[in-house]
Image (tube, rainbow, N blue to C red):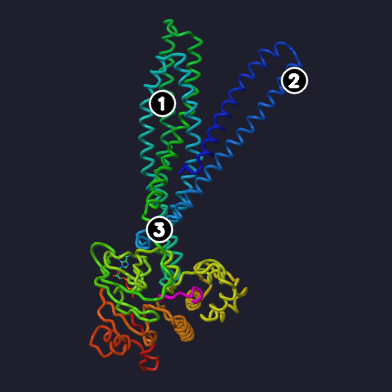
Amino acid sequence: MLRPNRREFLLVLLLMGLSSATMMLVPLWAKVLVNEIILKNDFFLLFRHLMWGLLLFLCILFLEYERESRKLYLGNAMEAGVRTRLFQSIICMPLSIMPGHQTGDMISRISNDVRVFGDGMREGIFNLIPNAMMVLGLVILMVWYSFTLTVMTLLMISPMAWAVGYFVRRIRATSRHAQEKLASVNNMVEESIRGLREIKCYGREEFVGERFSRLNEETLQAHNQQDRLRAINPAIVSCQTFITIGILILVCSWMVFRGFLPVADLIAFITCLLLIFTPISRISASLGLISKVFSAMDRFDEILYLPKESVHAENLPSLPTIKGNVVFKDVYFSYRRKGFRMEDISFEIGPGETIAIVGPSGAGKTTLVNLLLRFLEPISGTILIDGRDIHQHRIDTLRGQIGLVPQEPVLFDATLRENLSFGKMNATEDEIRAAASAAYVDQFARDLPNGYDTPIGPYGGRLSVGQRQRIAIARAFLLNPRLLILDEPTSALDPESEHLISDSLRTLWHGRTTIIVAHRMSTIRNVDRIIVLDNGRIVQNDTRQNLLKEDGLFQRLYAYAVSLTDDGWGRKIPDSASLDC
Ligand SMILES: Nc1ncnc2c1ncn2[C@@H]1O[C@H](COP(=O)(O)OP(=O)(O)OP(=O)(O)O)[C@@H](O)[C@H]1O
Ligand SMILES: [Mg+2]
């Protein structure tokens, strides 16, 4: 964490040393002032000496300001550096391990834990160093005055050092617990804001509020427990100070009385002793903060050392421009050792062909398209595009050529134009307008207060579901990919939106290799072929006409979907029936 700021760190250390050394000049200056000048009654010399004093004062001011500001800047820079590294790790994380991590927890690491780390650096490490230097200097002086007494002192304060070390270790453990609790609070806030509609709909405000209060109380307790331990350390130091000084004064008096120690050395030694406990007390407080830094760093490591997706693996060749032939050969995949698995997945799609993937919920439809996008890696088997193994080519050149219209498109808190050009940042205004018009986005864009420059709110929340879906389709138009993956919206859209979306989807997939995860009968009517998945296996793969004749899962799904809906007047309307069972 220090490496990128090594020079700044050394500079801060140098400034710390310089400002302490300059401070040491003050008593010297005062001694000269009294001894040499005031007593000699020489006003010219006094004036010159006062000027030196002023210069010394300005030097101290300058060095203190530089030291403090650079120390704070360095802490901030380290904080910002860690934050960027964490963010990079999070966005480079493979999607396959993402579900194991909660959003709120990650936000907590990147905000709260980074803050704890920054405070620990600024107030902990940077206070520890000058105080440790001071303790070292005073110990050297004490040895100079009396070696025996110094050894005695060190022996007497060793139980204190052990106790401080013990509590520092305990603070580290409790601090981790407190940080985890705070992460749970963040998780709950995030979850509740996302699910606000559900909370209100089911009237669960009070229930959720109480759950939050309980969690918040637990977090408070965890923080109190950690701070209680932090408060113990200064108390230990104070207690030890009284005991050590009391015993040493007795011993010293005896030594002076016996003539083993000159009185002047005794006074100097006791002064050092009195001076040494203040930096020791500060060191113990710093150690409390530093142990929090270590527990935050442990939590960073859990994110920083996650496996990364080799999106830009430079040693692999780029995937040439796709023509559109897709082949799955004996693909086998499983999320975990036990549970759901995809087996013997083999099929081929010709260039320009449109196929639909259907099957019951949980059959593996999304898993299949995620394998093609390399969001998941198969355990065995190969996936080829135009005869080339996709795992032997750079991921970015694969994904950059595939248009994806997800089931629930995620839009960003930016303008409509920025959201449209998300997949092609260098798109011209004409290209954006053409894509928007093909996906019927221009229809509602005209009514927005600032047209294409209107911010659409977090997650695109100021737009309807159908409008968001149309933006996702426009993105795919703009990318103009040879290979298209569509995850149909399952949420009930109004007839007009549904009609517009189906219309623009058909225009979009025309002439491209298209894989549609189909949820509606109206969609599969127009596809070339249908792959039927059941429990991770392909059970049927044929045209719609043939599948309807065949006694198999598709016929059952179809019959079930048809039996589900009517047009509101008791008549069946199979074309808009949902395929989800
Ligand atoms: N990240 C995951 N870890 C473990 N199991 C998972 C994970 N994602 C999905 N599964 C399991 O894999 C199976 C297939 O899931 P998948 O999302 O591919 O189904 P699907 O056919 O797309 O269903 P739906 O129509 O409901 O979207 C399910 O049984 C699911 O529980
Ligand atoms: Mg799915």
Pointer 3: what residue? 313
Residue nearest the viewer, comparing 387 with 266: 387
The reply, left or right, for residue 112 in relation to residue 447 is left
Residue 503 colored in magenta in the image = no
Tell me where residue 581 sits by quadrant. Answer: bottom left
- Label 2 and label 1: CA atoms lie apart by 47 Å
Residue 485 colored in magenta in the image = yes
Q: Is mark 2 within 8 Å of ligand 1?
A: no
Quarter of the image with the N terminus in it: top left
Residue 299: percent from left, percent from top: 39, 49
Residue type at numbered disc 1: Gln
Residue 82: percent from left, percent from top: 47, 49
Pointer 2: what residue? 47
Point out the stretch of residues depicted in magenta.
Answer: 477-486
Pointer 1: what residue? 240
The residue lying at 32 percent from left, 82 percent from top is 530
Q: Is residue 38 above or below residue 383?
A: above
